[in-house]
């Protein structure tokens, strides 16, 4: 342990701590001004903003590249430091364009923040004297580059070197001609390219997808969990006026660190896709006709009755609570056998060894915990051909498999889903469900970690919280689970998973919780 | 603390018998109102009332009237869709949809720029917030009329080509 | 029989015309008067071919509007009472006039016709009885609308009417003692006398306290400011007639002004000598009819001429203000005044100074009717004047004033008057 | 004329009386009672007693019933015709039987030939202010004053009863 004094405050930190982190601790969580320092990247020390005054040293030192020493006396806000930071900042700003009104970074820009803290001087550089560089250069499928705005902190190049190992970006030229760019013929097209946008402290790298869509200060953030694959990256849903504009990673060192893949970032588009179901549809004269919720509910309750239902099919894309309720409903309706947790052939794609998992369903682990077996399409087709009555499908798109569609063609299909899939087209009653960003739900990632996603936006049209629909169904067949709200529901789930504390799921820690008892349960699917 | 030498506690005088009998006081009140009546009866022209549609008051150059969008020298709108005005607007009456301009030197521009004149409170904060001097309220138009609520939502074309007429 | 019917019809017609003619004028006076009192211009827009008569066209426009408007009724009303209430109010307002003498008598074909619809022996009591029924229109209307505002309004109206009816009765009781009758014609006739040869024996002279109590309680009975708590806009929207619209509302609205007219007539009749012109009793009028008529015609002509001149001056000044038909108005009105002045002066050619005896009698009658109308108009205006001068009382202040001050004062007044009458008339 | 007035006012009175009994809402009942009072006032007027007629309207219809209505409206509030149960047969009978008996008694004991086309035989000064005053303040002054005192006592008592329930100080 090292004892040191920062700004007159004595703190004790472990040996080997960076002075930058020690300063943050001493300053009550407030970072030193910085551009290049990033805890998950190597130290570059190029921005020279985090300079501090250490007593006994003749010159100012950058805190990010200094390891604490016992007895250090550090000043971070002395006049000398402030003057130095201001001058360095002025250097950074010499060629920086006054683009803030049209810059997407405005509002979450390091340069703006630093300027408000240390700048506020009258610029001595004429606008016409600034070195002009390339603006709005498309360098990849997701990223657009503005070289003028770059402060050459080299975060992005380090990211491409150290995290993805692809090394597309580099710094070319020298002096005030130096600029970030890709080599000729190279594109920044790895699956993690948008992370460079996240870590870029200024508006040099911006997202093509989010470009000009919304000013960031208008966005509201909700923490949630990415549903793109079984990894379950922690995300921040940025939304406004009932519309999601982007997903950003939320740091969780147990799961995704500070990163997130580009594929996962684009999953929000499914929420606002054109073919979202928002009304109850009923097949009349061969066509799916929209009807009111009240009528649709009667239709649904009328179809789902013990004896009337021949088979129940769930999907690992549903939340943990829903799977628990679906399983319970299926047991009451059809007994133990004629049900499946999903089609085990679905939801697999290529993964990589960083974050993207080959298993593209967010909740397959939960199926395994619940002994809610998935079955291959052929086996299911065989079982379905033996069943009769109503085929109840919760989510997914099982009837995209021709064999299953053929087998189900004799049955009355009741589909509760989110999009107009092949299953919806084949169904007789279609009930809209809400998607992950539209509900408060629990997800079990491939590590067996239960994570909570909160509701960011409202579901479209008549769609509503899915567990309420399921509870309604259970009540209508006379098996009231007696859950009036989310806390009771979470207690029900905890009881089903035989967790030690029934309220554990109501007090889930920020980073989620992996129940040790269930850690060794086999992963579902292949 | 006393304000400008005024006493903190205002003491009220008890009414004397004549005053609390009301009738003399009412008569005095009648005299006051009657004086106004007679004076105005014989000086109808000196009344401060402005006969509005026939006469109009002159407003100062800083009067905030209906908005307009200014243009660059080449006639293109100055607005760069930075949303400062819509952010600062207390009535939330400005809706801007930004887009990529075909001209690379302009980069960002407002594809749509709608102002709901019914919601606008004419506070002028949008003028102050605008970094490009793109929105101004110097048209001096304050008579704004339309047949439907929808017509009060004016678009970019309207705001750029502001004629001096209140009808929408 | 036919003569009786004709006579009654004519009298009723006159009274009806007087009231219904005064109502729009009062509405106009209320608006224009309040505007001038508050340094505003008031209504001046509605006009027919540019003739606006300083806003007098507005009541006509209002009537057309109210007639043409949709009658919006609350769904949960008491259907029968809701429809009955405005009628009741109007009936009460109109029937009080039956016992008010508007003139002395008129000689037609040797017949002496009393100028009163029904000369009841208990005339004043009849007025009180009918006025007390007026409460029902207000109370039931407010209750039947099934709205909290109207209900509060009707409760307040009922309370104030109960409270002030007693004071009103007590206030005029002294008058009855002095004149020894309930009959309004006798009271008016009695006020033609002079005390000590120079002071008119008007009600206000012999009963000053009674007059103050009466005028205050009459204001309360008619729900006018400062006693307008049953329709106070700032507290209970419009009080008992909040839920009324169209013609039903018009009935309430007109009844308020009709009430005002009857109250003004009562004040005139009871305390200001009714049709009596002070110091000019009927014989004097008849004897000097010729001279007075001639003087009146000449004076009228001169006054009309001055008014015409004022109009023409205004027409010159207003030129180019509006650029439409309104600019022709002062000129037109000036021309009308000129014509009237010429008619006045031309009537001198009929030798009014040599008027016949019958003509003198008729002249006296019409002069007295004119005096009555002028008095009624003045006290109607006083209602308006007071409304725009005095702020309203609070509900509890109204109740306290009624029960704790005015009622005892009325009792004392009655006692003193009774003692005085006893002392004077006891042999 | 006289007979017409009598029958008309009688009909109005009866109509009002029936209304009082059968009205669903108390307010309508009170209104019917007022109608009945107006009918009786008309009867007085037909008997050349305008003073009594006016007093009838002034005191009963104008003052007392306004108070009644005031209280009813306060208690009932602004509510509309509430559903009430239909009267049972035996309650109807209990009302009808005495009514029929009384009617029959009147019909039997009423001297035949008196009613239609009757002639008035009231004294000339019936119901005039003077004789009424003479009776009230002369012959029966003691009873009149005693009744006033009794009513005053009743009023104070009612006030006291109403107050004591709320446990509020006198104001």
Image (cartoon, coloured by chain):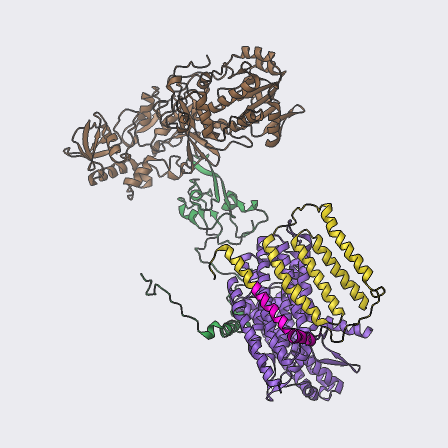
Chain colours: A brown, B green, C purple, D yellow
Question: Residue most toward the left?
Answer: A56
Identity of the residue drawn at 67% across and 55% down: D28
On the image, which quarter does residue A447 sit in?
top left
Name, please, the residue furthest toward the right. D113
- Left or right, D71 with reference to A361: right
Question: Is residue C259 positioned above or below A78 on the image?
Answer: below
Query: Looking at the picture, how far across and down is residue B66, in whole percent?
Result: 49, 50
Q: For residue A108, what is the image quadrant?
A: top left
In the rendered view, tell whether residue B149 sits above or below residue C301. Answer: above
Magenta stretch contains residue D149 = yes
Residue C93: give x, y in percent of width and height: 66, 66
**D54 drawn magenta:** no
Predominant secondary structure in magenta? helix
**Quadrant in which the C terminus of chain C is drawn:** bottom right
Q: Nearer the viewer, residue A201 or A306?
A: A306
* Depth order, front residue of A417/A296: A296
- Residue C261 pos. (x, y %): 64, 70
Magenta extent:
D127-154
- Look at 78% across and 65% down and name the residue there: D6
Residue C340 in view, yes or no: no
Question: Residue A161 location in percent, x, y?
Answer: 32, 21
- Of the 4 image quadrants, the one containing the N terminus of chain C is bottom right
């Amino acid at each position: 342990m090292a004892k040191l004094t920062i700004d007159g405050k004595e703190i004790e930190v472990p040996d080997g701590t960076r002075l930058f982190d020690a300063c943050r601790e001493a300053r009550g969580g407030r970072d030193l001004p910085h551009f290049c320092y990033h805890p998950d990247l190597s130290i570059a020390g190029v921005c020279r903003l985090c300079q501090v005054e250490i007593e006994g040293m003749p010159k100012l030192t950058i805190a990010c590249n200094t390891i604490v020493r016992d007895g250090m006396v550090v000043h971070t806000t002395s006049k000398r430091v402030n003057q130095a930071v201001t001058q360095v900042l002025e250097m950074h700003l010499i060629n920086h364009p006054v683009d803030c009104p049209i810059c997407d970074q405005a509002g979450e820009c390091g340069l703006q923040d630093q300027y408000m803290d240390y700048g506020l001087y009258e610029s001595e550089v004429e606008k016409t004297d600034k070195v002009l560089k390339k603006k709005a250069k498309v360098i990849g499928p997701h990223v657009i580059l503005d070289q003028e705005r770059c402060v050459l902190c080299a975060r992005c190049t380090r990211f491409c070197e150290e995290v993805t190992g692809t090394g597309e970006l580099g710094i070319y030229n020298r002096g005030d001609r130096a600029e970030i760019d890709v080599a000729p013929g190279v594109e920044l097209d790895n699956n993690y390219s948008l992370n460079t946008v996240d870590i870029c402290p200024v508006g040099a790298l911006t997202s093509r997808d989010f470009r000009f869509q919304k000013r960031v200060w208008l966005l509201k953030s909700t923490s949630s969990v990415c549903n793109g694959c079984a990894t379950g990256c922690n995300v921040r849903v940025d939304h406004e006026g009932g519309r999601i504009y982007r997903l950003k990673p939320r740091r969780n060192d147990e799961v995704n660190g500070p990163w997130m893949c580009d594929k996962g970032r684009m999953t929000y588009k499914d929420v606002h896709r054109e073919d979202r179901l928002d009304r109850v549809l009923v097949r009349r004269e061969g066509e799916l006709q929209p009807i009111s919720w009240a009528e649709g509910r009667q239709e649904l309750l009328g179809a789902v009755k013990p004896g009337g239902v021949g088979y129940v099919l769930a999907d690992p894309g549903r939340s943990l609570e829903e799977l628990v309720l679906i399983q319970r409903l299926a047991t009451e309706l059809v007994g133990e056998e004629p049900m499946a947790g999903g089609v085990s052939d679905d939801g697999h794609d290529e993964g990589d060894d960083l974050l993207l998992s080959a298993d593209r369903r967010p909740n397959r682990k939960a199926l395994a915990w619940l002994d809610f077996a998935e079955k291959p399409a052929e086996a299911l087709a065989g079982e379905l051909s033996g069943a009769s009555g109503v085929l109840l499908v919760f989510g997914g798109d099982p009837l995209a498999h021709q064999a299953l569609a053929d087998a189900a063609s004799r049955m009355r299909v009741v589909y509760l889903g989110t999009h107009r899939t092949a299953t919806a087209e084949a169904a007789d009653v279609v009930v809209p469900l809400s998607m992950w960003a539209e509900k408060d739900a629990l997800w079990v990632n491939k590590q067996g970690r239960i994570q909570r996603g909160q509701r960011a936006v409202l579901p479209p049209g008549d769609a509503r919280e899915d567990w309420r629909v399921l509870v309604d169904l259970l009540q209508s067949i006379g098996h009231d689970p007696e859950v009036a709200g989310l806390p009771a529901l979470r207690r029900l789930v905890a009881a089903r998973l035989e967790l030690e504390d029934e309220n554990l799921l109501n007090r889930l820690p920020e980073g989620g919780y992996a129940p040790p008892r269930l850690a060794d349960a086999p992963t579902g699917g292949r | 603390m006393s304000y400008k030498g005024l006493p903190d506690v205002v003491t009220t005088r008890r009414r004397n018998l004549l005053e609390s009998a009301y009738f003399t006081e009412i008569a005095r009140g009648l005299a006051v109102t009657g004086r106004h009546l007679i004076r105005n009866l014989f000086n109808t022209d000196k009344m401060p009332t402005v006969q509005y549609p026939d006469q109009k008051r002159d407003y100062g150059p800083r009067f905030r009237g209906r908005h307009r969008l200014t243009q660059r020298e080449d006639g293109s709108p100055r607005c760069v869709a930075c949303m400062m005005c819509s952010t600062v607007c207390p009535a939330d009456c400005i809706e801007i949809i930004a887009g990529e301009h075909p001209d690379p030197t302009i980069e960002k521009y407002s594809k749509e720029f709608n102002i709901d004149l019914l919601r606008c409170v004419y506070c002028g904060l949008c003028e102050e917030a605008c970094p490009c001097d793109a929105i101004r309220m110097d048209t001096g138009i304050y008579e704004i009329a339309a047949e439907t609520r929808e017509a009060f939502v004016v678009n970019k074309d309207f705001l750029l080509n502001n004629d001096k007429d209140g009808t929408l | 029989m036919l003569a009786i019917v004709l006579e009654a019809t004519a009298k009723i017609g006159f009274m009806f015309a007087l009231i219904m003619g005064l109502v729009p004028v009062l509405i106009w006076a209320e608006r224009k008067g309040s505007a001038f009192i508050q340094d505003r211009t008031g209504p001046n827009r509605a006009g027919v071919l540019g003739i606006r008569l300083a806003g007098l066209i507005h009541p006509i426009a209002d009537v057309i509007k109210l007639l043409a408007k949709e009658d919006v009724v609350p769904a949960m009303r008491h259907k029968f009472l809701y429809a009955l209430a405005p009628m009741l109010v109007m009936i009460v307002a109109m029937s009080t006039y039956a016992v008010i003498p508007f003139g002395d008598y008129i000689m037609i074909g040797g017949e002496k016709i009393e100028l009163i619809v029904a000369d009841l022996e208990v005339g004043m009591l009849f007025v009180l009885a009918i006025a007390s029924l007026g409460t029902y229109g207000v109370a039931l209307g407010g209750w039947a609308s099934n709205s909290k505002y109207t209900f509060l309004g009707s409760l307040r109206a009922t309370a104030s009417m109960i409270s002030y009816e007693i004071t009103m009765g007590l206030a005029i009781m002294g008058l009855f003692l002095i004149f020894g009758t309930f009959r309004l014609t006798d009271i008016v006739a009695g006020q033609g006398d002079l005390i000590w040869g120079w002071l008119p024996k008007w009600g206000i002279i012999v009963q000053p306290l009674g007059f103050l109590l009466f005028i205050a309680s009459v204001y309360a009975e008619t729900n006018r400011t400062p006693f307008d708590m049953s329709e106070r806009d700032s507290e209970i929207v419009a009080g008992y007639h909040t839920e009324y619209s169209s013609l039903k509302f018009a009935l309430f609205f007109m009844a308020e002004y009709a009430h005002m007219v009857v109250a003004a007539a009562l004040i005139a009749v009871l305390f200001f000598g009714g049709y009596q012109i002070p110091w000019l009793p009927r014989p004097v009028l008849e004897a000097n009819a010729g001279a007075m008529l001639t003087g009146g015609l000449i004076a009228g002509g001169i006054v009309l001429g001055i008014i015409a001149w004022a109009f023409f001056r205004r027409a010159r000044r207003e030129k180019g203000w509006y650029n439409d038909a309104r600019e022709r108005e002062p000129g037109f009105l000036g021309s009308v005044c000129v014509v009237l002045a010429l008619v006045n002066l031309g009537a001198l050619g009929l030798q009014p100074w040599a008027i016949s005896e019958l003509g003198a009698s008729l002249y006296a009658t019409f002069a007295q009717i004119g005096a009555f109308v002028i008095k009624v108009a003045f006290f109607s205006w006083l209602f308006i004047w007071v409304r725009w001068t005095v702020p309203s009382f609070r509900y509890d202040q109204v109740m306290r004033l009624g029960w704790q001050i005015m009622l005892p004062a009325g009792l004392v007044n009655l006692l003193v008057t009774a003692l005085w009458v006893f002392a004077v008339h006891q042999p | 004329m006289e007979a017409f007035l009598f029958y008309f006012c009688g009909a109005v009175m009866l109509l009002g009386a029936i209304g009082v009994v059968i009205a669903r809402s108390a307010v309508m009942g009170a209104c019917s009672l007022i109608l009945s009072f107006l009918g009786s006032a008309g009867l007085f007027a037909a008997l050349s007693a305008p003073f009594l007629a006016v007093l009838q309207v002034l005191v009963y219809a104008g003052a007392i019933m306004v108070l009644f209505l005031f209280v009813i409206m306060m208690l009932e509030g602004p509510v509309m015709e509430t559903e009430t149960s239909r009267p049972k047969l035996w309650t109807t009978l209990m009302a009808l039987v005495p009514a029929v008996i009384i009617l029959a008694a009147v019909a039997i004991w009423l001297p035949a030939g008196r009613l239609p086309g009757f002639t008035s035989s009231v004294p000339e000064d019936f119901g005039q202010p003077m004789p009424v005053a003479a009776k009230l303040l002369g012959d029966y002054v003691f009873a009149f004053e005693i009744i006033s005192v009794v009513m005053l006592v009743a009023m104070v008592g009612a006030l006291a009863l109403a107050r004591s329930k709320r446990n509020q100080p006198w104001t």
